[in-house]
Image: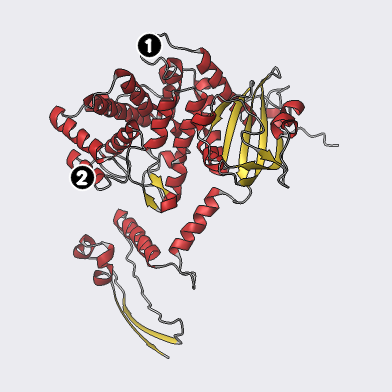
Amino acid sequence: MVTERLVADEILPPGISVRGGHPRDSSQLLLGLMTLSRWAQTCNNSESDPLDGIISKGVLKTLLSALNFRDVASVAHARRVAILAVGIGNCLGWEPSQQKMLEVASQMCDIGKIGVPDHFLFKPDKLSVEEAELMDLHRNIAIAVLQACRVNQEVLEIISQAHSHYNSETNGYRQIGSDVHLGARILAVVDAYDSLSTDQEYRQAKPHGDVIEILMKEAGSKFDGNVIHSLDRWIANEGSPFSREVAQSSCSPTASRGQPVREVGLLCHIFSYLYFLESLYEGYYLVDSDLRYVVWNRGIEHLLGQSSSEVLGQVWSSRTPCHADKLGRPLAERDCPMHKVIETEKPNTSTVQVQHCDGQWIEVELQSVPLFDTENRLHGVAQIFKDNSRNSRVPEFRELKMAASRDAITGVANRDELEQQLELFVSEFERQADPEPFSVIFLDIDFLRVSTIRSVIRPVTGFSSTSRDCCSTKCIRANWWRVTAAKSS
């Protein structure tokens, strides 16, 4: 028997509870989201409040406070975007209620950044492709939280469509047209405009004319050209709609507008956990104690082909979505994982088939988590889906990236990958105060049947000011090295 005293015994107070402390348990974090949902339902605005029917003012304050606590710059950005968006809406003759929806959407579209890891959110350089893909998940998180907070469906539509222009199925951008909410088209333009016209860690702000020119290059695909012209005319006629002091001002992150630090900390934990769910699983949804859908995230929309507007507020049943066992036999309601976890009061993981709206059956690993409080009262159930036909999102992305950057026969990096790596070397070289010289050797091998390659290489031992001024990829071969290769069979 071990009789020695552990180090932990000297650190932790006596009688500490095993389940005490921070709410890191997944069920407790999801319960926190359900608590936010119940609070949003009871915390109604007065009928004279312009936000009535759009969002609870208490919820709006809480979410902005949490974002401000996490990153002051994001709140300042949201304020500027809201000013620009509402200004364009006013120029277009929008009703006050529509302008309020656009204002709320502008301020809420970035709240998912509360859960973004620090090394992404505060990276002093451009994000890599992989980092940008993960960073984009914050928009899905924002939609899920706003669903739980019972925000007006039109606001959710504006936020979700503002950055949904890219269509991977057609391997390019789809045309921006009447199928995209005008508020979403406005939000996409002003969000990009403010980002480009504001100093960032990795680049300086660009002047108005340059920003408009950049946006117009993607008009008709990524942005609405009419909205860009409206913004250009408005600023040309009225000038900047805010001063630098107003644009950059925000409340102190420690004060958080009076919100208790503990409450804000809990929200940060909830957002971080949702980021984890978005990264590793295909989709999830939450139902309340009445089995009504409260959250139907973007992933589950894609997995099952049903939009949140069709599902939210409806009562769960074994037919929404349809369940079957691994052999394809339909499951009775009492045999579904949802009922099993309610009866046993314990989490459950099972392999079932669920049906896409087009009739296709998909085998998934389904995790069902009952959400009980400390008094053992059921507040809802979360169900988390993993498509068994896929390993995970990140490996699939890496495989595609490898396929695009490697030669199919040899597995060696192709020219596109070479140019990207050279660009990285050039950037690193220019950032150094006293850089070390480097050389590049090219060997061109034809038919992969070369027995001997004799190369006469004159490497560059230093860079003159002239060569550094012309450091584009196109002139690397001409200015940085000379390679003469001869081959014999």
Seen at 16% across and 33% down, the residue is 233
| Residue 218 visible in the picture | yes
> In the image, residue 232 lies at what x, y percent?
19, 35
Seen at 13% across and 29% down, the residue is 237
The image shows residue 130, relative to residue 242, as above or below, that is below
From mark 2 to mark 1, how far is it between C-alphas? 40 Å
The foreground one among 368 and 36 is 368
Give, as a three-letter code, the residue at label 1: Asp
The image quadrant that residue 26 belongs to is top right
> In the image, residue 317 lies at what x, y percent?
65, 30
Residue of label 2:
213
Numbered tag placed on residue 49 in the rendering: 1
Residue closest to the far front? 359
The foreground one among 208 and 318 is 318
In the picture, measured across the screen, residue 328 lies left or right of residue 51, that is right
Seen at 44% across and 63% down, the residue is 405
Give, as a three-letter code, the residue at label 2: Glu
Assess disc 1: are there few (<14), some (14-19) or many (≥20) residues with their C-alpha within 10 Å of its C-alpha.
few
Residue mark closest to the camera, 2 vs 1: 1
> In the image, residue 396 lies at what x, y percent?
53, 54
